[in-house]
Image (spheres, rainbow, N blue to C red):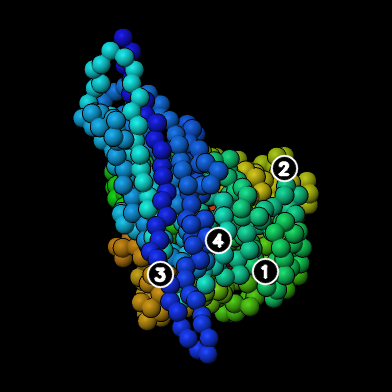
Amino acid sequence: MKKRNIMIIVFMLIIGFAAVSTTLVINGRLNIGYNEENFSSGVVYTRAETEDGTAEINQDDKNITFETNKLENVNETATLEFDVTNKSRNYDASVTIKCGLKENFESFSEYLNIETDITSPFRLESSETKTGRLVVTLKKAYDKDSETTAEIECELVATPEERETLGDEYKYIHKEKMLNGADPVIKENLVPVTIADNGEVTYANTQKKWYSYENKEWANAVILVDSPSKEYQENDIIPESDIESYFVWIPRYKYQIFDEGNYTEAIQSKPETSIAKEIQIEFESNSTNPSAGSKQGEWLTHPAFTNFDVNGFWVGKYETGYKGASSTEEAQVNVMDSSKVIIKPNVYSWRGISVSNIFKTAYNYYRELDSHMMKNTEWGAVAYLSHSKYGINTEVRINNNSAYLTGYAATDETDQTSYPGVSGTTSDVTLPYNTPTGYKASTTGNITGIYDMSGGARDCVAGYVPSSSDASGFTLADLNIYSKYLDLYPDNTTIKSWNNRILGDATGEMGPFYYYVDKDNNKRYHNNWYNDNSCFLDSTNPWFYRGGLYVDGVLASQFYFNDYTGNTNTGIGSRLVLTVKN
């Protein structure tokens, strides 16, 4: 005999008012009172979702109705996620929420547990949206002979509160449910955009779907050249000449640890097969308690997000270029100059610059958006997302453009199976970002992802070990002042100290490691994912660089890591990050 418990749940929103009016006499009368219509029509439900999509909001946006799937087994749950929004510009609101079985169904309380994760009462400011979840659990087996329907009612009561200023006008913003609140944050002069397959850039309408991580379509934004975003309107095409920098959003997530990275020795042979695997990722917001796993199979909120307590960060879509450079050589400049930053496709990667100048140039690029040189853990966060079901989920193709032009990809005909790989500048060897070949050099396998994570210039990242041989140009005082923006590794590290990794930085976890001869007859350390070069830090070479060089062939990918002095090097560039908070 089949037994089940079906519930129809109705959410009701009640608007309460106090009768208040004030009369002032100044040679006449001024009547002051509530704009009741403004408030009563302004506090509404703006989203309602269940696992199977059965929730509906009625026409006046005050009621939510949904019907659950069968609850047959103990601890089965039904969940409704909803957004309540205060669209009123005149008033803030104090909101209470109370849920329970309807009067005729109170006998079912022995079977059902009803909980909400939103604290009552809560404050809802003008134009603010808050998300709540109602979870109903079958707490013991239902033992009656027939199917039964129970009804639950949740009542939200909103009471107006005075404001001294007119609030912002409410505007719906697209959110993707599976991101769980880690949606892109647009502030200051960041302009949300969509990018067509041919590279054409359009000012995004954020009220519609402009990204979909479920479909490997990552959110993009740009900073314009000496031109405020207000000159453009939604759906306008933005000329490439008006764009200074491209950025891509990396949502906050936790991942399942697949290897603890406790390696100190290399195997003296070449592995027969790769152990590359899909990295398991779940998105979350910083309102969720971070996961703190440390063992294989446990979950860890990626440290790139917890370090700044953010819901994500914006990453330079391409390696940082040198504005105005018209040749490879002109982009080799060792200066600290934020005005020369350009992050675009088909520009010359900025190289020949010390770590200190890279760092301070990035740090001063856009302080309002917390700009900084990419950390080693931030590189790891991008690399792991790229190798999940939300990214390309394989090796990012090498940028083998020997002129250090950004956004290129090796053609299918080139040999990248050993070191050195085939490189050059002609179209039979390398093609740009906005071609089917170019997409393969993106972290998503399409034009929405991040480029130059494999090949191009080697990207220096802010990860180091204290050393007397540090040639970066940093003083000890600098390292202390900017410690928040630097990943610090133990000072007892050697080239084989993969166990000194930071979980999530995509170094030690890429083991086991191997030591064997490449095509050029030199022995190197390789990981067991894509045979990438894998050397840890030591006291002589205390700084990390990532991704590999345009000529590195099989050695290069998003999981490549190596060490160097921190001094100027014409093969080493960098990447920029913005940590924008909600």
Q: Secondary structure at mark 4?
A: loop
Disc number lying in front (3 or 1): 3
| Residue visible at 44% across and 34% down in the picture | 66
Q: Residues within 10 Å of mark 2 (few under 14, many from 20)?
A: some
Mark 1–mark 2 Cα distance, whole angstroms, equals 30 Å
| Residue visible at 64% across and 67% down in the picture | 223
In-front residue for pair 243/277: 243
Which of pointers 4 and 1 lies earlier in the amino acid sequence?
A: 4
Asked if residue 549 is positioned above or below residue 352 in the image, the reply reads above
Residue receiving disc 4: 170
Which of pointers 4 and 3 lies earlier in the amino acid sequence?
A: 3
Query: Looking at the picture, how far across and down is residue 438, in whole percent?
Result: 69, 47
Mark 4–mark 3 Cα distance, whole angstroms, equals 26 Å
- Circles 4 and 2, Cβ within 8 Å, touching? The answer is no
Residue receiving disc 1: 229
Residue receiving disc 2: 436
Mark 4–mark 2 Cα distance, whole angstroms, equals 40 Å
Left or right: residue 340 versus residue 479 is: right
Which of pointers 2 and 3 lies earlier in the amino acid sequence?
A: 3
Mark 2–mark 3 Cα distance, whole angstroms, equals 65 Å
Q: Please name the amino acid that badge 3 sits on.
A: Val
| Residue visible at 35% across and 70% down in the picture | 466
Q: Please name the amino acid that badge 1 sits on.
A: Ser
Which of pointers 3 and 1 lies earlier in the amino acid sequence?
A: 3
Q: Which mark is residue 20?
A: 3
Q: Residues within 10 Å of mark 3 (few under 14, many from 20)?
A: few
